[in-house]
Amino acid sequence: MVFSILLLTASFDTAGIKQYRIKKVVIDAGHGGKDPGTHGIVAKEKDIVLDIALQLGRIIKENIKDVEVIYTRKTDQFIPLEERAEIANRNNADVFISIHANALSVKSVHGTETYVMGTNKREGNFEIAKRENSVILMEENYEERYEGFDPLSPESHILFSLYQNAYIHNSLMLADKIENQFKKRVGRRSRGVKQDGFWVLWRTSMPSVLVEVGYLTNATEEKYLYSKMGRVYIASGIYRAFREYKAEIESMN
């Protein structure tokens, strides 16, 4: 199955032998500008994830010279969901990584989660997808731009999450590596790999993941993510997972 999926992104060398290369990664810092995302006592999601995204890009550029890093935003700027996906598609990216922070009314809940496109499995997953997709309501002419998609409707989420995703296997591979890094190397509590209907994942034409780096509503986790070192550790974990994913994909040449 992996081989058939990789054919979609195969390039050819001068001898006509298929070569699989991970050359471009788009790093998406969620929210921004007028959309602060979730928040803790002092931390705002848009600020936390922007710094992690920039740190991740810096580490990739310093250590993997043949990979081009592209950001959906590098400042506190509002970017529509549709445009985030289009940035990845226009640049023919090989991987899309969207970074977010979580929130829940139950303040004891903590841990990381990495999502891929898929059908809704649990009510809790839908609540997260609904929150991340609801930024659509802040955009002008969102009814026309998003073709009637209602971010608050379970039916809308289930409908478009049932679309065929040719990159699901590779997305799951990357997501699993990210959560393993968080658990084994970074020392965070991993809540696992999950699937649900995120607009930004549906619209991207490459393996894509959405990483929830922790719960800002948990005091201990907010303190960790608010610290510079904590954000560097999170970025380093995602980097090592990306490096492993790239090596595994290219080892199939």
Image (cartoon, rainbow, N blue to C red):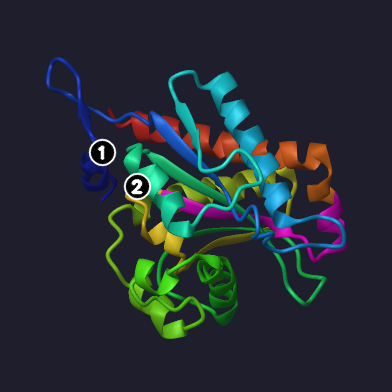
At horizontal 36% and vertical 35% (from top left) the residue drawn is 249
Left or right: 82 in relation to 223: left
Which amino acid does the dot numbered 1 rest on? Thr
Q: Position of residue 238 (x, y in %)?
A: 59, 41
Residue 246: x and y in percent read 43, 33
Name of the residue lying farthest toward the front: 140
Residue at image coords 45%, 45%: 96
Of residues 44 and 250, the one drawn nearer to the viewer in this rendering? 44
Which residue, as the protein is rendered here, is positioned at the far top? 14
Judge from the rendering whether residue 232 lies leftward or rightward of residue 134; answer left or right.
right
Spatial separation of the CA atoms under disc 1 and disc 2: 9 Å
Circle nearer the N terminus (1, 2): 1
Q: Is residue 7 above or below residue 163?
A: above
Near-viewer residue (167 or 227)? 227
Q: Which contiguous range is marked in magenta?
A: 208-223
In front here: 47 or 171? 47
- SS for dot 1: helix
Q: Amino acid at mark 2?
A: Met
Quick one: SS at disc 2? loop
Above or below — where is 178 with respect to 242? Answer: below
Dots 1 and 2: beta carbons under 8 Å? yes
Instruction: Tell me where residue 232 sits by quadrant.
Output: top right
**Residue furthest left as drawn:** 16
Residue underneath mark 2: 206
**Mark 2 Cα within 10 Å, few/some/many (few <14, many 20+)?**
many
Q: Residue 25, located in which quarter of the rendered image?
A: top left
**Residue 253: x %, y % from top left:** 27, 27
- Pointer 1 residue: 9
Q: Give the residue at x 84% y 43%.
A: 227
Q: Is residue 213 magenta?
A: yes
Magenta highlight on residue 32: no
Q: Is residue 185 visible?
A: no
